[in-house]
Image (cartoon, rainbow, N blue to C red):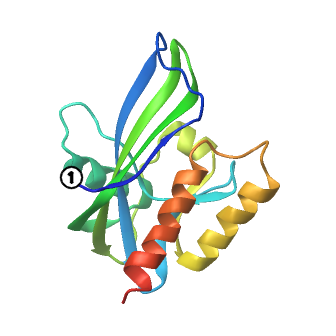
C-alpha cells in the first residue's frame, strides 16, 4: 500500500522512550461529493470511520468491523486499498510517551441505509455519530476547528483534514 504521509514531530527524540504502536484500518465511503464520516461532539470535528485492528484480525476484517460498529453500515465491500498514513505523536497513556499510529485507508462501498451502531463507551461519551456530509463542508469545518479551538482539539484532526483534502483531490475532482 502506498505511503500517503509520514509524520513525526520536529526535534522528537525517541531514544529511550516508550512507544505504543497501534495499527488501524479506516474506510473512505463516498456517494458523489458526500462522504460518510463520524462527527464527534467533544472535539466538534469530522473523522473517517475506522480504528484499531484487534489481535488476530487482518486489516480487511478490521475495517469492516469498525465501519459496522461506528456507522451501522451493512454489506461493506472493499473496493480498493488507498494508502497508509503513519504518525508519531505524544500520548497521554499510562507507561507510554508516544503513539505510533499507522492508519491503513480503504475505499469502500456500503448499503446506503445505516443500521444500529455498536459504539464503545468513550465514543458514546464523546458524542460520536455517523453522518453523510458534503466533503467540502467537512474540510471547511475541520479547518475552522483547527483555527479557532486549539484547547479542545482532537489529537488526530490534522490527519483527518489531510485525508479529506486528498480524497477530494484524488477521488472526487479527478472524476
- In the image, residue 50 above or below residue 81: above
Give the quadrant of residue 19: top left
Front residue of this view, candidates 22 and 43: 22
Residue found 38% across the figure and 86% down from its top:
174
Residue at the disc numbered 1: 60
Provide residue 68's location: percent of width, then percent of height: 34, 57
In the foreground, 84 or 57: 84
Tell me what residue is drawn at x 23 percent, y 47 percent.
59
Residue 70, quarter of the rendered image: bottom left
Residue 110 in the image: state x and y as whole percent: 30, 72
Q: Residue at x 70, y 46 (%)?
A: 153
Label 1: how many residues lie within 10 Å, few (<14), some (14-19) or many (20+)? some
Kind of element beneath mark 1: helix
Q: Is residue 126 visible?
A: yes
Q: Is residue 132 left or right of residue 52?
A: right
Q: Residue furthest bottom?
A: 175
Residue 55 image point, x, y percent:
24, 30
- Say if residue 105 shows up in the picture: no
- Quadrant holding the C terminus: bottom left
Amino acid at each position: 500500500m502506498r505511503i500517503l504521509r509520514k509524520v513525526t514531530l520536529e526535534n522528537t527524540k525517541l531514544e529511550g522512550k516508550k512507544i505504543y504502536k497501534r495499527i488501524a484500518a479506516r474506510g473512505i465511503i463516498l456517494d458523489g461529493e458526500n462522504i460518510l464520516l463520524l462527527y464527534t461532539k467533544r472535539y466538534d470535528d469530522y473523522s473517517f470511520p475506522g480504528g484499531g485492528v484487534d489481535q488476530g484480525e487482518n486489516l480487511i476484517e478490521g475495517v469492516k468491523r469498525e465501519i459496522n460498529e461506528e456507522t451501522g453500515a451493512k454489506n461493506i465491500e472493499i473496493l480498493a486499498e488507498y494508502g497508509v498514513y503513519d504518525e508519531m505523536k505524544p500520548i497521554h497513556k499510562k507507561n507510554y510517551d508516544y503513539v505510533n499510529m499507522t492508519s491503513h485507508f480503504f475505499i469502500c462501498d456500503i448499503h446506503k441505509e445505516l443500521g444500529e451502531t455498536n459504539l464503545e463507551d468513550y465514543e458514546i461519551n464523546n458524542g460520536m455519530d455517523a453522518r453523510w456530509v458534503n466533503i467540502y463542508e467537512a474540510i471547511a469545518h475541520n479547518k475552522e476547528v483547527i483555527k479557532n479551538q486549539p484547547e479542545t482539539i482532537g489529537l488526530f484532526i490534522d490527519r483527518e483534514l489531510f485525508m479529506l483534502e486528498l480524497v477530494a483531490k484524488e477521488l472526487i475532482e479527478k472524476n
